[in-house]
Image: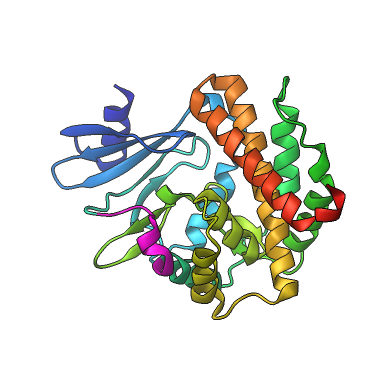
Amino acid sequence: MKIQKTIRDILNEAALHIKHIDTGLTNDNYYVKTEHYDVVLRMPKPENLGLFDYEHEGHVLNLLNDSNLEPHLWYFDPTTGIKCANYVADASTFSIEYLNRAAKLMRSFHNLKLNSGKVFSIKEHFEMYRNRINNPCYDLNFVMEIMNEADAYSHDNPILCHNDLVPGNFLFTDKHDYLIDFEYAMDNDPCSDVMSFITENDITDINLRNQFYHAYFGSLPDPTLQHKLDVFEMAHNALWCAWGLMMLESHQQDIYQEIADLKYLRLCEAYRKETPTKQ
């Protein structure tokens, strides 16, 4: 079995127990126990070849090596994307009770002010995903001006950002909180990460948003900052709508239709709020 061989090659020990972790849409993740190790093994799905730059991810992981943001890394292959790191026992992924802790963790990450040398362009990823869609369910042409504006923000003095702040990429424990899975991590405007978090966790309640803004920024956004956040909100919803449509065509799984539907709904809601005169 490939998993057993991979673990033996990495840890020089036999896998005593292997359990598939039912999270993640682009990777197969496994909890593996050996005599001396408890680890998570990430195996990228072959059908997602070309969607990630694993060499760059390896560079990012090296930058974060002393940050204690991620669980201890045992192995990373910059060609295949196979990754092996310590398993974090008794950890919770994000739920609303961890809102302030998530803000603090993101702020600590951004305060490192690292640079990876590669900018995460939402516009370029959006176009890459759209080019892989043959029969789109939704017309996303109306967001191109928004994508251009987001792209300008992303290239203006960017720092290393995560760019994929879904619930499962946070691990909260009694002793330490972690950010994991830096496949999309590149330089960006931190406000993009703020809205990645807001949109990926579908936080629509204004009071919860304001609570998060207070925890992250220290105050509510002024009109200029709020406009930037609104632009990134629309851009992220459009991006992941396109991603969902792309994945739906290649995988034919209902989860991708659900993602595309929700992202398109949230995109239209945000667009109507931001541009009422255009409706």
In the image, residue 23 lies at what x, y percent? 38, 38
Side of 180 where 155 appears, left or right: right
Residue situated furthest bottom in the rendering: 218
Side of 152 where 250 appears, left or right: left
Above/below status of 158 relative to 279: below
- Residue drawn at 27 percent across, 61 percent down: 173
Q: Is residue 95 magenta?
A: yes
**Which image quadrant for residue 157?**
bottom right
**Which image quadrant for residue 54?**
top right
Above/below status of 275 relative to 129: below
Above/below status of 243 relative to 1: below
Residue situated furthest left in the rendering: 35
In the image, residue 235 lies at what x, y percent? 70, 50
In the image, residue 264 lies at what x, y percent? 66, 39
- Residue drawn at 76 percent across, 63 percent down: 153
Instruction: Give the position of the N terminus as an image quadrant.
Output: top left
Q: Magenta segment range? A: 91-101
Using the rendered image of the protein, determine whether residue 112 is visible from the camera's viewpoint. no
In the image, residue 228 lies at what x, y percent? 72, 65
Side of 182 where 141 appears, left or right: right
Which one is in front, 162 or 67?
162
Above/below status of 52 relative to 273: above
Q: Is residue 125 magenta?
A: no
- Residue drawn at 79 percent across, 52 percent down: 146
- Residue drawn at 28 percent across, 36 percent down: 7
Side of 122 where 210 appears, left or right: left
Image colouring: rainbow
